[in-house]
Amino acid sequence: MRKKLFNLLIRRAKKLYKDSLRNYKERFYDLALVYLEQALQLFLKAILLKKFGDFPKTHKIRELLNLLGFELSEEDVLIVNLLEDVYIGGRYLEKEYSKEEYEIALKFVKKIFKKYGFRNSNL
């Protein structure tokens, strides 16, 4: 495994996660979701790097989770769809996201972090 790249991905994921929480507190839900999606994406790529020595060059959360063998519930699928939509919609489209959407996505991301070894105190 490339330890330097792993550490960089984790450091960036932590920073994006903290920025997400800050934007949530400031009621910038669109940006909060963008940063949350990016934090999850980088975190999953770091875990894949650690487990397999590499990761795919994709932004699709579902694909990254599938590679880790994570089984999505019906509710999880809807949240992943939201996060994947945020990747484009939160940046470039006239799409706005709500506080409730952020909170649901945050709960899911925390579940993923916990499953793969990160607790809130680590982030």
Image: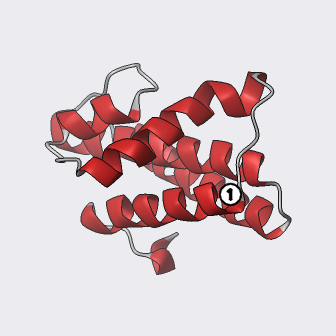
**Residue 1 in sight here:** no
Q: Could you tell me which secondary element the residue under label 1 belongs to?
A: helix
Q: Position of residue 64 (x, y in %)?
A: 30, 34
Query: Residue drawn 19% across and 33% down?
Result: 67
Residue 27's x, y, as percent?
Answer: 83, 62
Amino acid type of the residue tagged 1 in the rendering:
Ser
Would you place residue 98 above or below residue 1 in this image? below
| Mark 1 Cα shell of 10 Å, populated few (<14), some (14-19), many (≥20) | many
Where does residue 63 sit, x and y in percent of width and height? 29, 29
Left/right of residue 74 with respect to residue 43 in the rendered view: left
Residue sitting at the far bottom: 121
Extreme residue in the right direction: 26
**How many tags in the picture?**
1
Left or right, 32 with respect to 104, comes to right
Compared to residue 8, the image places residue 112 above or below, namely below
Determine which quarter of the picture holds residue 69.
Answer: top left
> Which corner quadrant holds the N terminus?
top left
Q: Residue at x 17, y 47 (%)?
A: 71
Q: Is residue 108 left or right of residue 64?
A: right
Q: How is the image coloured?
A: secondary structure
Could you tell me which residue is drawn at 56 percent across and 41 percent down?
38
Residues 69 and 76: in front is 76
Q: Is residue 68 left or right of residue 63?
A: left
- Which of 38/83 is in front? 83
**Residue tagged by mark 1?**
20
Residue situated in front as seen by the camera: 76 or 42: 76
Residue at left offset 37%, top offset 68% = 118
Residue 16 image position (x, y, % from top left): 64, 52
Asked if residue 29 can be seen in this view, the reply is yes
